[in-house]
Amino acid sequence: YPVPQYLNFSQSDPFRVFSATRKHQSHSFHKHGQSWLGLVTGAKHWWFLPPQHLPQPPRLNACDYLTGKATPPDGTIACVQYPGDIVWFPDQWYHATCGIDDWTLGVGAQHGPLAYVQQYPTLDATTTVGVQEVERTIQECLQTEHEAETATTAANLDSANLATLQQSQV
């Protein structure tokens, strides 16, 4: 899809994003290059923190902020995105999301290094894909996302915390 002119905010090419989430599915607080997401259907709750926020926000199911199981960090800015809304945020801002409808679908773009290896075929109007292929691709994406989150979490731990974590798992 073509990136709208007013969202083509960088000289580097962003990678395009297709976002499909279910109700109560979340992305915990994380950060990357500036990004935007236009919602096609459903509703999504967003939380934001500036890049310099300390301590680093916890990586937990962001939907817990809506159920009361967790409290957003002090200084959090929140909004709800509906179909037709575009959410944009600057480089390195922490953000977390929670799908609040049965299905939430959006398209957008993200700047910065690719977080995941993406080697999926490009689809167009003439492409047909079976249900099994879609389910396999979704499972690959979920596995890759889990591996990336695990790697990011490990990279953020200092050696003392990592040693403590390893001892507690023995």
Image (cartoon, rainbow, N blue to C red):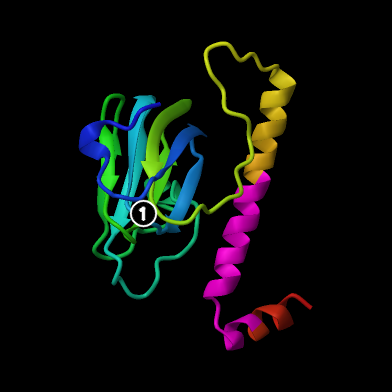
- Return the x and y of residue 58 as percentages of the image width and height: 45, 65
Front one among 107 and 62: 107
SS of the residue under disc 1: strand
The residue lying at 30 percent from left, 58 percent from top is 91
Q: Is residue 22 above or below residue 112?
A: above
- Return the x and y of residue 55 as percentages of the image width and height: 37, 75
Quarter of the image with the C terminus is bottom right
Magenta span of residues: 143-162
The residue lying at 30 percent from left, 50 percent from top is 11
- Return the x and y of residue 49 as percentages of the image width and height: 29, 60
Q: Which residue is mark 1?
A: 95
Residue 109 in sight from this viewpoint: yes
Q: Residue furthest bottom?
A: 160
- Return the x and y of residue 54 as percentages of the image width and height: 33, 75
| Residue 119 in which image quadrant | top right
Principal secondary structure, stretch drawn in magenta: helix
Is residue 117 left or right of 130 when viewed as pictured?
Answer: left
Q: Residue furthest front?
A: 11
Front one among 34 and 25: 34
